Image (spheres, helix red, strand yellow):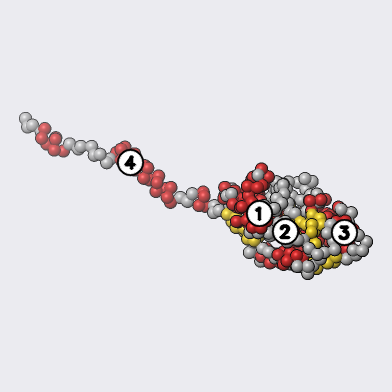
Amino acid sequence: MKNNSRGHRRHRRHPSNWSGPRLRCLLAPLVLLIVLMLVPSHAAAVPQQTLRIGLMPAVNSIPLIVADAEGFFADEGIDVTLQMFHNQLYRETALQTGQIDGTVSDMINAINAWSGGFSVQVTSVTDGLFALVTAPRSRIRSIEDWKLQRVQSVRVGLLEDSIIFYSAERMLEAHGADPAKIRPVSTLQVPTRMEMVVAGQLEAAMLPEPITRIALQRGAHLIADSSVMEQTPGVLLFTPRAVAEKSDAIRAFYRAYDRAVAAVNADPDAFRDVLIDRGGFPPAVRDTMIIPRFQNARVPKPAEFDDVVDWMRRKGLLLGRPDYHDVVNAAILGESAEN
């Protein structure tokens, strides 16, 4: 009988190190890696939204400047570009042409936009501070001087169809002074207005904080400021397109805004350097500018809106009468009109 053991050994298969279950185990991570590389992540599928916001050199812009400097916008997952304007007309043009998505503005501008067929959406109030100042050599150096019978007319640098004219009248009324003495002199650019009153080319001017501080340092007299008002009609507003297409980004914007409000209210002096370095505030006012206590974002109250509308109609600045909801969008902040 033949011994077939050699033949058996010659045909025996030895198990390979790269076959069977072991091979499948080694290939599984590679397959998973390839799948992950081919399938886009959620973050890549939903690009970071951007917002372009216009500012003016005034204290109601402070929460936005701080939110940007402290990285709060980035923390909330949005890319916010802040653009400074020194001329209200340029700011409004940028808004209407889509160069910016929203801006720090005021209720009067928002109502004018509605009247002109461009229904911007007011999404919150802002906390501004304005002052009526007079020239260094003016006959009027106090609110009591304004009340004197011999003072019948005062040339005041401001914009007639604006928050500053509204605020000037409301401030004077709060002090029992006659706002009818104002003779408006239209001056668009805030720095120019300040220079004109300091030089005596205007007897008085309405200025925003912190530009007020510069005028006072150069000899102007403080007559009244808007701290006597319950609320100035400053607002944040957005274009209809931005509200329609970027509502989630705007909500994230307001989360960052409220974080900045909390930070500034907790220690306002900590941000003076930031405001000079990143906000374009004049270095001369670093230690003297008034930083108000800010409110968390809220929509304007109907009574605040109606007061502005009534003032505009009395001045002949508005023919129609917008409904509150034509101008104010409470949905972004999830508030009711009765707040």
Give whichever of 231, 142 is nearer the camera: 142
| Residue at numbered disc 2 | 217
Please tell me how many numbered marks the rendered image carries.
4
Q: Amino acid at mark 1?
A: Arg
Separation of residues labelled 4 and 1 (CA atoms): 65 Å
**Which element type, helix, strand or loop, lies under badge 3?**
helix
Res. 153 in view = yes
Residue 9 sits in quarter:
top left
Where is 203 relative to 266, above or below?
below
Separation of residues labelled 1 and 3 (CA atoms): 30 Å
Q: Closer to us: mark 4 or mark 1?
A: 1
Q: Amino acid at mark 4?
A: Leu
The numbered dot on residue 286 is 1
Q: Amino acid at mark 3?
A: Asp
Disc with the residue nearer the chain's start (1 vs 2): 2
CB under 8 Å between callouts 4 and 3?
no
Residue at 59% over, 52% down: 69
Separation of residues labelled 4 and 2 (CA atoms): 77 Å
CB under 8 Å between callouts 1 and 3?
no
Q: Amino acid at mark 2?
A: Gln
Residue at 75% over, 54% down: 129
Residue 16 sits in quarter:
top left
Separation of residues labelled 1 and 2 (CA atoms): 12 Å
**Which element type, helix, strand or loop, lies under badge 1?**
loop
Separation of residues labelled 4 and 3 (CA atoms): 91 Å
Residue 253 coordinates in the image, percent (x, y): 63, 51
Q: Closer to us: mark 4 or mark 3?
A: 3
| Residue at numbered disc 3 | 145
**Which element type, helix, strand or loop, lies under badge 2?**
helix
The quadrant of the image that shows the C terminus is top right
Characterize the local packing of mark 1: few (<14), some (14-19) or many (20 or more) Cα atoms within 10 angstroms.
some
